[in-house]
Structures are given as structure tokens and as C-alpha cells.
Amino acid sequence: MRRKKVLLVENDSKGCLTIDKIFIESGYYITKARDGLSAFEKIVRDHYDLVISELHLPQMNGIDLLKKINEVNGSVPVILTSANARVEEAVEAMKLGAYDFILKPLTVEMIKIIISQISNGSTGTVKDRSGAKFTIITKNTEMNRLLQEARDIADSQASVFIQGESGTGKELFARYIHYNSNRKDRSFVAINCSALPETLLESELFGHEKGSFTGALFRKKGKFEIANHGTLLLDEISEMDIQLQSKLLRVLQEREIDRIGGISPISIDVRVIATTNMDIKKQLKDGKFREDLFYRLNVIPFHLPPLRERKDDIPLLANHFIEKYNSIDKRTVKGLTEEAMKALMSMPWKGNVRELENIIERAILMCKGDFIDTKDLFMNEKNKETQETKYTFMPTVSLKEMEEKVIFHALDQTNGNRTHAAEILGISVRTLRNKLNEYREKMANVR
């Protein structure tokens, strides 16, 4: 196993003695630098698992060093320290992505906590082509194993199949694979296979020639061509029509596509990652998904655990979302009360990480004090019961009418987002789309 390395940037060598001893006892290899410029030169040449830097340094201060580190390796945790920092400096450091900002003197207990956090907690942080960072936050053993496997297979050309419930972070995991691969400087293109009718999905995937069908006023490249030499994410692929699945299988086998109305095939070099939130074994058994396509996609399988199986991540994630929405909504919430955290830990999390994020976002807006309490996490229970029972007792309407009301209520609650509405209703997006078409035809006949 590779020995972990820490870079200590400190212009006062006496201040490093205690730190040295604890890190060595914890199995770390220590490298030192006396100023920000030499520290950055070391970071460019070598890999470090942790950087601890004094804020006030000659040649390049800690803030500037943090900025430079973000440019070359945004995944390394950086801790800034100072005996006399201003609040503005600490805030700027955290906004720039510092792992922590600690006031000196550093105690033995502080260093041990830092080592424990770095060893037990893990963040899968990568940058997209624009330089924006996104992070998979976890200290869960299973998630850490999956992140390591993702890094191990990132450079492979093999197809990846990611299964997991809605809200577990399948698209984020797919991006993590892409931006850790040798294709990271190429396009990452995502398409939701459940969001489009079959006729439009084929054109979106493979493109079409001008005049190939009514409304085809110009040539259009499909997602496969746009993602050439990069990665294509086929999100919720189990919703794809069975006939289109056969065409996709041919593309994966031959590594070439045919635009609709095209004359000759077009060669492509695309790494395909597919996801589903459905029971794929049942889909195969029911004949709704082709076995040969599944085996072609399932070369490297991943199954993301639901949040209820990684509850040790809830405090990490909750605090991350508090920081995120504090910044977005210009709030200063410091955290959660003990009762609020207990409430979060006891929930079943059917919507997983996405549900947790939504609850924290709302709580940030509802919170009137420094800490989020249980009353901020959940809307008025009386109102909640009213919403849940709004369509329960309707003796004067038919089952069909009740179904229509419930569907439109779900769409209203999700601001028209069909994917989220379908998740709430427990049906597929395709079923929801068919129901809406049915209602549209009914209204047309009435007119």
C-alpha cells in the first residue's frame, strides 16, 4: 500500500515539531516547504494526500497557494492555519475550497482529528472542462470502494452500467468516471432516455439529414457524434423502446452510426455509460430490455447504495448542503441542532441524496436562528397531512378522474418536471407521458 504524503508549508520550523511527530506516528511521509512558491513547485512535481499551509508566507501567501493548487489538482485537501487571521481571510479560504481553516496553535487533538477525517472521510472531487468542481462526499466504506474502482477503470474503453435508486447520484458518478479518465478534456454528453418519445430519441441519439422526415429542415448531429472521443451518458436507459435498443446494440458493436436519412455510416469513438433506477433483472425477464444489449453495456457494473444504507454520510452531506445554500441564498446558518440531526438519521430517504438536499435547501430558507431545528426541516405537519389526503376521499368522482387529478397535482408540485413527478407517482416517465397524451386527446375531442 502506498504511504500517504503530507506537505507542510511553514516558515517557522519550530512550529512543525509537534505536527511532524503525530503525522509520522500515523504513517505519513512528511515533506516541507518554507514558502508558497517552493511549495507549489513540489505540488506540481509530486502527489500529496494533504497540504497544511501557513496563511502568511513569503513570495506566495496561503490564499494564492490554494488558488494555484486548485488549478493543477483540485482534489487534494488543503488546510490553512494562522495565529492572527482576519475573518475575511478565513471566509475567502473556505469559499475557494479549503478543507479547513484552523487558528494556531495547533494542538495534538486537532491534528489527530484532521488525520481521522482525512483517513475516514473521502471526497471524490473532479473538475469539468470549464474548471467547475463537483464532489462526491462520503466516508462510507462501500462508496469509497466504488470511487476507487471508478478511478481504476476510468481509462478503460469498456461500457459501464450504473444501477441505483433515484437520487443516489448516478449521473454524478458517471461524470466522476469521465473526468478521471484520459477523455476528461473531451465532451461529456448526457441524454435522458425517458424524457423523449421514441421518434425524437432516435434523432437525438443518431442525428438526421435534412429532409429525412417532416420538419427536418436541416442536418442535425446526434449525441453520439457530439460525444465523439468523449463520453456519452444514456440516463435511465431501461425506458428506451425495444426497437431502438436493437439499433443501439448495433452502434455499440460496430462503433458506427447511421443518421436518419443518411447514405453512409459514420465511425465514432465514444465511451458509453448507461444508468437505470429500475430492477433490470425484472426488465430482462419481462422482455422489456434486450439481454444482448444489457451484456454489451454491463461490462463494468456499479450499484450505488441508497442513502439509508450509508447513513454515516448524512452528517457530512447535510453540512455540505448547508454550506452550499448558505452561499447561494446569502444565509449564515451554522448547522443543525442535535434533535434535527437525529430526525435526519431516522428517515427512510426514499428520494436519497436528492431528497436530503431538497430538505436542507428548504430548511435554510425556513431557519430563523443560527441552527436548523426539526421544525425547519419539515413543513407544518397539519398542512402536510392536508396535502397527502387532498385526493383521498372523493366519493363523487370516478377512479379515472381521481387518477387525472393526482397526476396533475404531482406535476404542479414539481413545477412541471415529468421525471420528478413520475418518481413521486411511482410510475415510469413513459407511462406518465402516455397518460398526458390521453388527457390531451380527450380535451381535443371535447372541443
Image (spheres, rainbow, N blue to C red):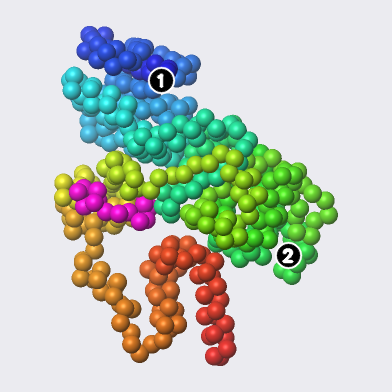
On the image, the x and y values in percent for residue 168 come to: 41, 49
Which residue range is magenta in the image?
Answer: 341-355
Q: Is residue 351 left or right of residue 374?
A: right
- Mark yes or no: residue 130 visible: no
Secondary structure found at label 2: loop
User: Which residue is disc 2 drawn over?
Assistant: 216
Residue at 53 percent across and 49 percent down: it is 275
Q: Residue at x 17, y 53 (%)?
A: 373
**In the displayed structure, does residue 422 sit left or right of residue 52?**
right
Q: Which mark is residue 48?
A: 1
Q: Quadrant of the N terminus?
A: top left
Q: Residue at x 58, y 51 (%)?
A: 234
| 183, above or below 191, in the image | above
User: In this rendering, does residue 437 appear at all?
Assistant: yes
Where 136 falls versus 51 (above or below)? Answer: below
Q: Nearer the viewer, mark 1 or mark 2?
A: 1
Specify whether residue 342 is painted magenta.
yes
* Residue type (three-letter) at the residue carrying disc 1: Tyr
